[in-house]
Image (spheres, rainbow, N blue to C red):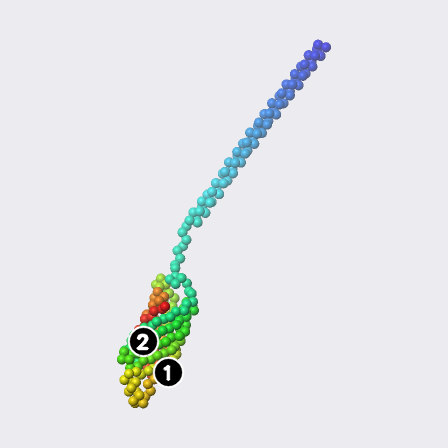
Amino acid sequence: MKYLKLFVTVFAMAIAMNVSAQSKTTAKSKTTTTTTAAKAKTTTTAKSTATAKPAAAKTTTTTASASKPAAKKSASYSGGFTPLTTVLLESKIGGCHGTGGFGENIVLEREFHKYIAWDIFSLDFSCPFNTGFLTIGVKTGIRGYTPRFWEDRMRGFSSLALGYDCGILTGSARDAAKWMGYDTEFHGLGLSWGIGVEMMDHFQLGYVLEYNSAMKSTSHFARITYKF
């Protein structure tokens, strides 16, 4: 009986020691697993940070590219073509019917293309300096423009107009014609052709030739024009 109690006591102590050893082993395994997971997590974070670096470099490159200045574009003086209706007041001076003279023209112009305009209506007046004879004409025509130059401030042009001309004798010339039985008024075809240059969209300088079929006479004028 005494030996049986001793055997039971030793067996119980052995079981207790075995259980204690297994508990320590399990705790150590859990600690090792936790440490390994922490290390893996740290490694993953480091890799993610390292991967993000090229993205930052790419963003910097894009910003530098966007900061480059845009190419400078040339500006047009008129800012592009817009159909426009204008009134031209033309003053002319030169040779009128074989002698010196002057004149005025009023033109209603419709510019419907950047190179072409229609002179819808023009009222022409010219007279020698001695005012013995004057011409009044009503015409319509066309006016062509060149491309602009000198930083879009200037362009060339040419005009052609046809219509009706009336020549009228005045003063002593009229009295003499009446006394001799001649006509004091002459009616026929009127033609005018001009060439010149336009500046700043408002001023024109040029030359104009005018022909009157009734008098069979030709006049040559220097012409300056203002566009309203």
84 or 29, nearer to the observer: 84
The quadrant holding residue 19 is top right
Residue 113 position in % (x across, y down): 42, 68
Labels 1 and 2 touching (C-beta < 8 A): no
Q: Amino acid at mark 1?
A: Gly
The quadrant holding residue 150 is bottom left
> Quarter of the image containing the C terminus?
bottom left
Q: Residue at x 35, y 76 (%)?
A: 124
Left or right: 78 in relation to 48: left
Picture disc at residue 34: none
- Most extreme residue toward the top, as rendered? 2
Q: Residue at x 39, y 77 (%)?
A: 139
195 or 22, nearer to the observer: 195
The residue that disc 2 covers is 103
Q: Considering only order in the chain, which callout, 2 or 1, is on the residue closer to the N terminus?
A: 2
Q: Is residue 7 above or below residue 38?
A: above
Q: Amino acid at mark 2?
A: Gly
Instruction: Determine crowd level at label 2: few under 14, some 14-19, many 20+ residues with C-alpha closer than 10 A.
Output: many
- Can the viewer see residue 3 in this picture? yes
Helix, strand or loop at disc 1?
strand
The residue that disc 1 covers is 188
In this rendering, the count of numbered labels is 2
Residue 128 position in % (x across, y down): 29, 79
Residue 200 position in % (x across, y down): 35, 65
Q: Residue at x 31, y 88 (%)?
A: 178
Left or right: 59 in relation to 104: right
Instruction: Determine crowd level at label 1: few under 14, some 14-19, many 20+ residues with C-alpha closer than 10 A.
Output: some
37 or 222, nearer to the observer: 222
> Quarter of the image containing the N terminus?
top right
Mark 1–mark 2 distance (CA, rounded to whole Å): 19 Å
Helix, strand or loop at disc 2?
strand
- Can the viewer see residue 142 in this picture? no
